[in-house]
Amino acid sequence: MSKAKLSDIARAAGVSPMTVSRVLNGRGGAGPETSERIKQIAHELRYRPNALARGLKSDKSGIVGVIVPDIANPFFPEIIRGIENVALQHGYNLLLCNVVESPDREIDLMRILESQRVDGVIWCSARLSEKPLVKALQSFKAAVLVNRTVEPQIAGSIMIDYRSGAADALKHLWNLGRRRIGVIAGPAASRGSMERLEGLRTVFADLGAEAVATVYCTPDVNGGALASRELLEAHGQVDGLICYNDLNAVGALQTCEALGIRVPDDLGIIGFDGIPLAEFVRPKLSTLHVDKYSIGQLGMRMLLERIEGKFVQHSIVVRPQLIARNST
Amino acid sequence: MSKAKLSDIARAAGVSPMTVSRVLNGRGGAGPETSERIKQIAHELRYRPNALARGLKSDKSGIVGVIVPDIANPFFPEIIRGIENVALQHGYNLLLCNVVESPDREIDLMRILESQRVDGVIWCSARLSEKPLVKALQSFKAAVLVNRTVEPQIAGSIMIDYRSGAADALKHLWNLGRRRIGVIAGPAASRGSMERLEGLRTVFADLGAEAVATVYCTPDVNGGALASRELLEAHGQVDGLICYNDLNAVGALQTCEALGIRVPDDLGIIGFDGIPLAEFVRPKLSTLHVDKYSIGQLGMRMLLERIEGKFVQHSIVVRPQLIARNST
DNA sequence: TGATTCTACGTTATCGTTAACTCAAAAGCG
DNA sequence: CGCTTTTGAGTTAACGATAACGTAGAATCA
């Protein structure tokens, strides 16, 4: 049994489809009893407006594209929840896209989202380089970036203040007396990594010190484990480790365990992001907590404004908060 | 600048829109040089077929709805990745819906997905009761349930063999000499919980024993922590704990830490699901590993078959695999 | 009472794409 | 050379919803 359409209801009610449309959309235009009859029949036939037809006519799909590098990274699900929370309140749905693999994949996804005529996109941690990114973004009615900026007219952005976060991490370790500090820097190509390093450089300069070593790696547990092993084996005297994210920090914890390094006694480790996992490992991980749910909400609100043609704010910066636990 | 449409290309190329449609869809119907010219112009104008118009015409949206109780639960992102992997290979995209709250919300989501004219739905751990569930499912062209079954003509299903999994968990503890076993049973209303308990009952019967205590709780870390505290405080002599899932088990680990119970010396704990977290806690958690990515892939493949009207299999059972680590 | 405004609808046309059909010219064939 | 087939197109109509406009009859007003 295929879906009922307006004309089915119209026939059953002895009116024109237009009248049904008006009644079901609460735009009046029919007498009280006719309206009641129409609503009744619509209910009986389980009428569901065809979003495709509506979208075609109105040039609005009611869908927003959400692009994340990897949903399996616990950083993103919470952002998605934040986005969804606001989106649903405003009648939008999420078309979720996982990038996972290559930047080529990002291009493909753009084409798909364009075809779907999404009303906007929220793009988390885009890896595409500036030029193609801007080009891709221009073909959307509205766009918001998380963790990246472009000119305001191209897209809004929600930024995490990695500089201050990394700076706080370093100060925290320094205040605890750590002087020989290594850095697990995450993906070399990533902006987030660069900014953290900038934040660190500033503080190091103030302190008249510098990092003992910096190693790049993939932003997951294994990457952190490998990078920290490399770093710690080459620089045994390191007593503080600043990690790109919590996953990397957990990897470092594993390495310490394997190498017999006591945390925090021999080595203080601090992560970034504040994912739930950070509380579950032992020692509990100190971290710079980022309010991911809020980021999602803010991003979606900003997108809504852009969809409606307002440009109240084009950039919001979220500041990570130091949570000192047992790893430092 | 709004999007180019077929007629724009047609005008520029001096042909009819139909010809452009045929050429761009590789259905021939134009000479080689005309075809080349059309493709060239389409590229220059950054033409993207309007999926709404196409969907309206063809009654296919190219979208599948995915419903999960909570993406923040690490069990689901991997399933989603599996689904997406297969979906993208076949030209489908995912409309992701998080339930989070109430069963009412599930009903709302159904209406939305119906309106969007999704080509099918994959519904994970549906909580709706039988009648409304069946009613909801009937209005889709194709549906696959994960963790739930209904009559085969209503929906396919991917089931996890909780009975055997729970049975294996119990045998494992028993073989290690544990005789006073408690159960953290997860949500009382959940099918998964019931089935696990059935599996346990069978084995307990064979062994001529029974569980010391069974406590229900929410399926997250905190639920596990609270439930295990309740259980352990009331039954100090318990030496084995079978948990509904890994999150619960991690909660139990926390409780043990707080109560000074040594794991696995005093108490063996085993989880379920095999989420990454299980490997990161200390002691590493023994668990019944479920291949979530495969579940996603299998589910999507099954959905594809149903979308195409085939009904090769209507049910697949995935068996959890015991992974013995340090918590037992 | 005649003019005007409302009420409660109906008609038409359109969004972008494409299936089905049509058709003229070119190519192939005996 | 006349006939059929193929090639390279164009035309029409439809998918379902709805904006814009039209209209007959009832109600209101001067």
Image (cartoon, coloured by chain):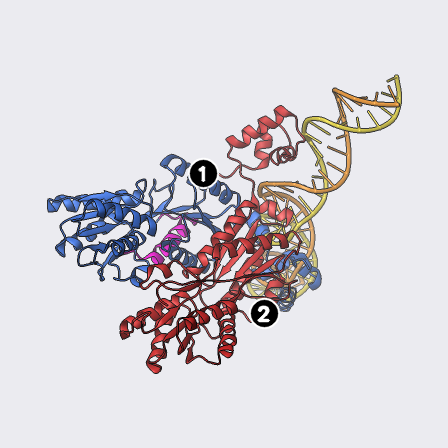
Chain colours: A red, B blue, C yellow, D orange
Residue hosting label 2:
A132
Q: Nearer the viewer, residue B91 or A105?
A: A105
Residue A162, image x, y percentages: 51, 67
Select label 1 or label 2 by which is in front. Answer: 1
Q: What is the CA distance from the residue labelled 1 to the residue labelled 2?
A: 43 Å
Which residue is identified by label 1? B104
Above or below residue B119? Residue A11 is above
- Magenta-drawn stretch contains B307: yes
Query: Circle 2 — which element?
Result: helix
Residue B125: image location, x then y, percent: 36, 46
Residue type at numbered disc 2: Pro
In this view, which residue lies farthest toward the bottom? A234
* A30 versus B265 height, above or below: above
User: Secondary structure of the magenta portion, mostly?
Assistant: helix
Could you tell me if residue A127 is visible in this image? Answer: no
Determine crowd level at label 1: few under 14, some 14-19, many 20+ residues with C-alpha closer than 10 A: few
Residue A120 is a magenta residue: no
Amino acid, disc 1: Asp
- Magenta stretch, residue numbers: B289-311
* Nearer-the-camera pick, A130 or B241: B241
The chain to which mark 1 is attached is B
| Residue B272 horizontal side relative to residue A118, left or right | left
Which of the numbered marks, if any, corresponds to residue A151? none
